[in-house]
Amino acid sequence: MTPTVSVTNAGKNYGKTEALRDVSFELGAGETIALVGHNGAGKTTLIKLMLGLIRPTTGRVSVLGEDPASGDFGVRARLGYLPESVSFHLALTGRETLAFYARLKRADTTTATELFDRVGLSRAAVDRPVRTYSKGMRQRLGLAQALLGDPHVLLLDEPTSGLDPALRHNFYELIEALRAKGTTILLSSHALTELEGRADRVIIVNGGNKIADGTLDDLRKLARLPTRIRVTTKAGKSLEEEIAGQVVKHHDGDLEIEVRQEDKLAVLHRLSAAALGIANLVVLEPTLDELYAHFLQGQKDSR
Ligand SMILES: Nc1ncnc2c1ncn2[C@@H]1O[C@H](COP(=O)(O)OP(=O)(O)OP(=O)(O)O)[C@@H](O)[C@H]1O
């Protein structure tokens, strides 16, 4: 993996508040990473460090091989950022707003029309003042602004808040296309369910510490949470033999079998041999929500 971002033993104090403590990770080209954590966990502080808006109290941050706080324009031009709450000048049109940011970033304005198409802002909308925009349209304008200059690293803070399901879908299609081009995309979000299957990797921060970092599979292996197998049996059929020795609960009239990762295939094998007695079977792996709760609890217990 070619790292585009390296955070090495970074700590950040705001006066007496220790917002970040000895955090290290690398982000790679073409990687989509979810940065998750409670309010006050340190996510925005990390993003500000990567943007070079603040300097670490301890440790180092490097973006595209340079110190983002060094004042060098080259790095910042290749960084795209969408803040959590986008606020634009309401009297400017979408097109004027983008032209303004393009000048700030010294980016090419001729790509503006193509950018509007990519984020799904209609030709009619871009020449209307931002004051007439819905929250979703403002968010899309924000995204177009973040995409100016074809950034190699994109930092997006709660990018889908305010977007309806169709727009969320469009947003993730756009992210997928950028990922395929090799862009590093960091999504800071509370919407854990929608990140599943969309982020290659998850970094969990809490109280200024990095408490987990890995793919969903890595986190599942580490957490050792059980897989649940939900089985609807046919009337009068019992699966006592097949599920003997497993933790069995009842869920809306179905059987819910909690199996350890290492027993999963053997139990599924026994169940498939008894398929005639089964009306339906669903395998539920631990969700990101459950993994998140597990790692937070683990950190609490270790204190
Ligand atoms: N400029 C500042 N001055 C003092 N304390 C700050 C400052 N910015 C952040 N903090 C504190 O640092 C800690 C981490 O804040 P940060 O904004 O990075 O969290 P976050 O994970 O982004 O939270 P949220 O999800 O609410 O945006 C919090 O305790 C916060 O109160």
Image: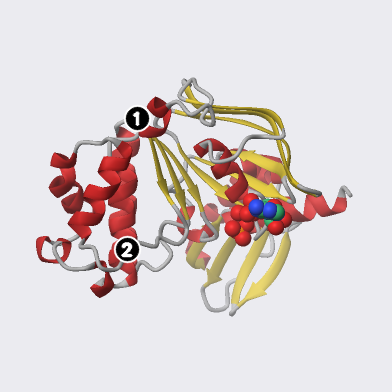
SS at badge 1: loop
Q: Is residue 49 visible?
A: yes
Residue 199 is labelled as none
- Amino acid type of disc 1? Gly
Question: Residue at coordinates 26% horizontally, 43% vertically from top-left?
Answer: 102
Question: Residue at coordinates 57% horizontally, 65% vertically from top-left?
Answer: 230
Ligand 1 sits in quadrant: bottom right
Q: Position of residue 45 (x, y in %)?
A: 61, 46
- Label total for image: 2
SS at badge 2: loop
Residue density around tag 2, few if under 14, some if 14–19, many if 20 or more, within 10 Å = few
143 horizontally vs 76: left or right:
left
Distance from disc 1 to disc 2, alpha carbons, whole Å, reads 32 Å
The residue nearer to you, when weighing 197 against 202, is 202
The residue nearer to you, when weighing 203 against 136, is 136
- Front: mark 1 or 2: 2
14 horizontally vs 239: left or right:
right
Q: Which residue is mark 2?
A: 89
Residue 58's place in the image compared with 277, above or below, is: above
The residue nearer to you, when weighing 57 against 214, is 57
Residue density around tag 1, few if under 14, some if 14–19, many if 20 or more, within 10 Å = some
Q: Position of residue 71 (x, y in %)?
A: 48, 29
Q: Is residue 120 visible?
A: no
Question: Residue at coordinates 57% horizontally, 78% vertically from top-left?
Answer: 236
52 horizontally vs 104: left or right:
right
Residue 182 is labelled as 1
Q: Position of residue 28 (x, y in %)?
A: 47, 28
Q: Quadrant of residue 72?
A: top left
